[in-house]
Amino acid sequence: MAHTLLILIIAFVTLEFIVSSVLSWLNTRWMTHPVPPELEGLYDEEKYRRQQDYMRTNKRVALVARCVSFGLTLIILGCGLLGWLDNLCKGWTNVPVLQVLLFLVIYNLFNTVIALPFSYYSTFVIEERFGFNRTTHKTFWLDALKSFLVSTVLSAVLLGVVYWLYQTFGQQFWIWATLVCAVFIIFFTMFYSNLIVPLFNKQTPLPEGELRTAITDAITSFGSRFKDIYLIDGSKHSTKANAYFTGFGPKKRIVLYDTLQDQMTNEEIVAVLAHEFGHYKHRDTFRNMIISIVTIAVNLFIFSLLVGNPDLPAALGGTAPSFILALVAFSLLLSPIDIVLSPIGSAISRRAEYRADAFAAEHGHGETLISGLKKLAAHALSNLTPHPLVVWYSYSHPTLAQRIRAIRLAKQAD
């Protein structure tokens, strides 16, 4: 049975690789498709060639990274290296929870080391070549170290608690683990901007002036009040811009990248924030949080039925019962479900984006939102012609042309 599970896992990993590769190939082939009428003139001839070069360069690097990851995964699975690592950790300590956490740290470190060369090349070769990069080498390596430490510490705390619950409650651990994960998600949704973001970026209150006044007046017209409006120094990493709402309840805040002010007018920034406020009004963050918690509960319940099956760790080369190997094997066996659910999740996300755009349009910000979105897309050298199948399968946002058409229809309906 363990051999059969291993074959299934390899088949599922291969299927995932094929699906992602085919979608990427389709997107590359579709890049030369005619630009939609709504976007004509967004790029001049020279800038359009530059955009096409940027996309192809990124696609090539992504393909190499995908192939390396796929090849290493096959080697690791075929040689039973995860089982070897589990035995190694068990040889270092007799404390079960420490064995699990040692496995996690080494596993995370391996994945980080594999990803770093591609991240470095993307930042200092591709982004530098096309004028986006502002990251120094010191900042890059410090951020990489901090990212590894933060992700490892947080995942170690969560996994350690879940494993303790498994040892304490047995097969019923999934109920308590779901509650712990729910608290974890709610806490970091509320405090992410306060606790995590400052490790990588400096946030300062948006100073009094025309922009803050325009934002405050717009939010008042939406029937709400926000006192926490922050500016983040995104320019220390990239020239690309963004804005978002974060948190909820008393911890909600608006965050603007400082690069927005270089690329957009105050009216366009307000329009982009009107879109973000649409998410807030429609409770999209809360809805996504509930979906995440329900998904975790279902996965943990199914895992609780299988965690004691000795064939799961044996499929990865384990020679004894292992909670962490069973968890890794289970997550790999979920790949086909993720492939099936991805289009559904993408469709739900795109629907939320349409609603948020409509909210901005209904409050008189439709044309300025279109103008702002066009500027953001042009500056970021965005792909204007993604393949429809790729959009359907994996795009969390509608294409720019689709958004423009929908905003104008919302204006007409209003």
Image (cartoon, grey):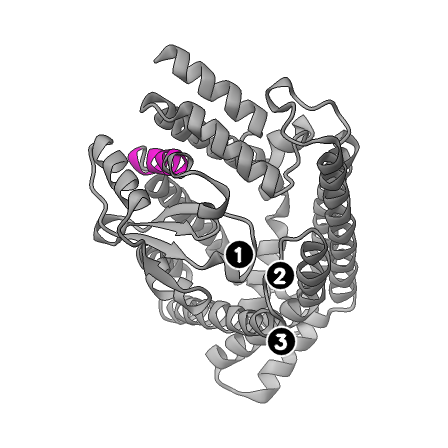
Decide: is 88 above or below 347.
below
| Left or right, residue 349 beside residue 401 | left
Q: Report the amino acid beneath label 1.
A: Leu
Q: Report the amino acid beneath label 2.
A: Leu
**Is label 1 in a helix, a strand or a loop?**
helix
Q: Quadrant of residue 64?
A: bottom right
Residue 342 visible in the shown view: no
Q: Position of residue 372 (x, y in %)?
A: 48, 34
Mark 3, other Cα within 10 Å: few <14 / some 14–19 / many ≥20 = many
Residue assigned mark 3: 86
Residue assigned mark 1: 306
Badge 1 vs badge 2, beta-carbon distance below 8 Å:
yes
**Is label 3 in a helix, a strand or a loop?**
helix
Please name which of the two marks, 2 or 3, marks the residue nearer to the observer. Answer: 3
**Residue sitting nearer the eye, 394 or 215:** 215
Q: Position of residue 346 (x, y in %)?
A: 53, 35
Is tag 1's residue or tag 3's residue first in the polypeptide sequence?
3
**Range shown magenta:** 271-281
